[in-house]
Image: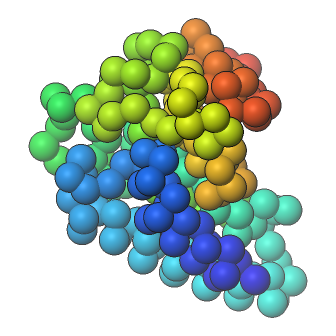
Amino acid sequence: SAEPSVEAALQACHTEGRRLNAVVAPPHVPATQTERVAEHARTTAREVDSRRAGGTPRSRLDGVPFVIKDVIDLAGVTTTMGSTVRPEEPAGASAEVVLRFEEMGLVPVAKTTCHEHSYGILGEESAHGRGVNPLRPGLTTGGSSYGSAIAVAAGIVPAAGASDGGGSIRIPAACTGLFGLKSSRGLM
């Protein structure tokens, strides 16, 4: 069933995700936005379970919860890009990568913290603050997609979407004991 795994991911985002500074939460975005994401995730999980019961899952990933780096738009949520300078309005539509994940049945549960404007490899410069490495709390997580790496390494979610222009996925993955993949240009 997707409902228990999505609910567990939402709870983990709220507790471990915030403790490790992996997820974007108030005051960086309004609480109404994080609540809207959670309600959408719960509704989507119920739809997944209905598809599964009917024998028509979208893919083998149908119902898997995932998080999205905060430089990638998720409809209804402000994209802060790890900066105090941000748009006043939330994103009107989700980015193509999020839409493709959702087409496969993956369920977005939160946005993740990142180095400001994805411009850095240490993950130390962000309005969100520094992330906590779940393997070695005193060591760096790397950057810029550190929140996504933390969320997967800590077991908050099994999958995360991020961006990688110069190691932004691969460096935090290596620092947190994960494998990070930079997809080929134009394929995702």
Q: Is residue 107 visible?
A: yes
Q: Compared to 38, does 133 lie above or below?
A: above
Q: Which residue is drawn at 67% across and 39% down?
A: 135
Q: Which residue is drawn at 40% across and 22% down?
A: 124
Residue 57 relative to residue 167: left or right: right
Q: Residue at x 18, y 31 (%)?
A: 84
Q: Compared to 116, does 22 lie above or below?
A: below
Identity of the residue furthest to the top in this view: 166
Q: Is residue 90 visible?
A: no
Estimate the x, y position of residue 130 in percent, counting from the top left: 40, 32
Identity of the residue furthest to the front in this view: 138
User: Residue 47 versus residue 65: which sits nearer the camera?
Assistant: 65
Please state, as top left, top right, bottom left or bottom right, where the C terminus lies in the image.
top right
Q: Compared to 135, does 40 lie above or below?
A: below
Residue 126 relative to residue 12: left or right: left
Please state, as top left, top right, bottom left or bottom right, where the N terminus lies in the image.
bottom right
Identity of the residue furthest to the left in this view: 88
Estimate the x, y position of residue 63 in percent, counting from the top left: 70, 69
Q: In which quarter of the image is residue 4?
A: bottom right
The number of callouts visible is 0
Estimate the x, y position of residue 143 in percent, counting from the top left: 52, 22
User: Residue 58 versus residue 63: which sits nearer the camera?
Assistant: 63
Residue 3 relative to residue 19: left or right: right
Q: Which residue is drawn at 31% across and 37% down?
A: 128
Q: How was this image coloured?
A: rainbow
Q: In which quarter of the image is residue 64?
A: bottom right
Estimate the x, y position of residue 109 in percent, counting from the top left: 51, 62
